[in-house]
Image (spheres, rainbow, N blue to C red):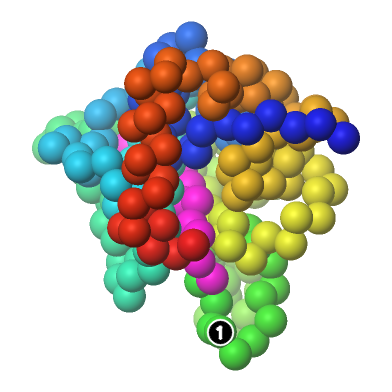
Amino acid sequence: MGSRKIISFDWAIKNVLRDKANFGILEGFLEALLKQKINIESLAESESNRNHEFMKYNRVDLLAIDESGDHIIVEVQYSPEQRLFKRLLYGTSKDIIDNISTGEDYSNVKKVYSVSLVYFNVETPDAAPVDYVYHGKTEFFGFHSGKKANINTKFLEGYDKNSKEDVNVFPEYFIISLDIFDDNVKDALDEWSYSFKHHEVKDSFKASGIKEMSEKLSYVKMKPEEQRIYDNLNSSPSYNMLG
């Protein structure tokens, strides 16, 4: 079974995926994760990319805006940090605040998805992980009954385009812990995760957009100078601090 070596996803976010011609790669990955059709209209410059020194131990943020106006924050992080969840909360909150003016109608508040590709375990080290993909969102339950509340959708105006069974106006968080992925590929998201973890796309992979990634992020198609810079960065101690 063959495979093609690709550049790492953090490098791709910084150097390749900001080209509209390459949006199909990001769309394919997000569709496998969010289980819905994604059409990216534009990319906004995230604050962490400004004056960004591209080193592997830093995260790389990308803010995608789909055709429905939803915002999707994508980041890659190699080094664990104690304040990870507070930073994720800050990132989604800041995006909401930055995109609505004082006095503007609340119906203009955008849905925000936070997607983190991390190369470490977010669960306690003394317990077996329950999964390698984690999904968090805000839900309401009866204080006394413990049952999930059936929120009237009239209070969720503008957010029931995909599912009337599970509507949520609050930010949602997805953390993909590639470090603990066991390489057992069963579905499209596993194909993407395998490719991100090992920097290669197997010929047998069929997820939407993944062949496009194999072609456009191919290491062998980089110019010699680009390969030299990429290889030097990969071989530096700070870049490989987590192996």
Q: Is residue 234 visible?
A: yes
Identify whether 109 is placed above or below 242.
Answer: above
Relative height, residue 96 to residue 214 (above, below): below
Residue nearest the observer in this picture, 241 or 53: 241
Hey, which quadrant is residue 106 in on the image?
A: top left
Q: Position of residue 91 (x, y in %)?
A: 29, 51
The residue closer to the viewer here, 202 or 43, is 202
Q: Is residue 2 magenta?
A: no
Q: Position of residue 85 (x, y in %)?
A: 37, 66
Where is residue 152 shown, x and y percent of the image?
56, 50
Question: Which residue is painted at 51% across and 33% down in the image?
Answer: 7
Residue ranking furthest to the top? 21
Which residue range is magenta in the image? 109-121
Residue 110 drawn in magenta? yes
Judging by the rendered image, the residue that carries numbered circle 1 is 125
Q: Residue 71 lies in what quarter of the image?
A: top left
> Which secondary structure lies at badge 1?
loop
Q: Residues within 10 Å of mark 1 (few under 14, many from 20)?
A: few
Count of marks, rendered view: 1
At x 51% / y 71%, what residue is drawn? 122
Q: Is residue 50 left or right of residue 239?
A: left
| x 49%, y 62%: residue | 243
Q: Is residue 26 left or right of residue 59?
A: right
Residue 24 in the figure: left or right of residue 101: right
Measuring from the top left, give residue 59's x and y in whole percent.
Answer: 33, 50
| Residue 111 in sight in this render | no
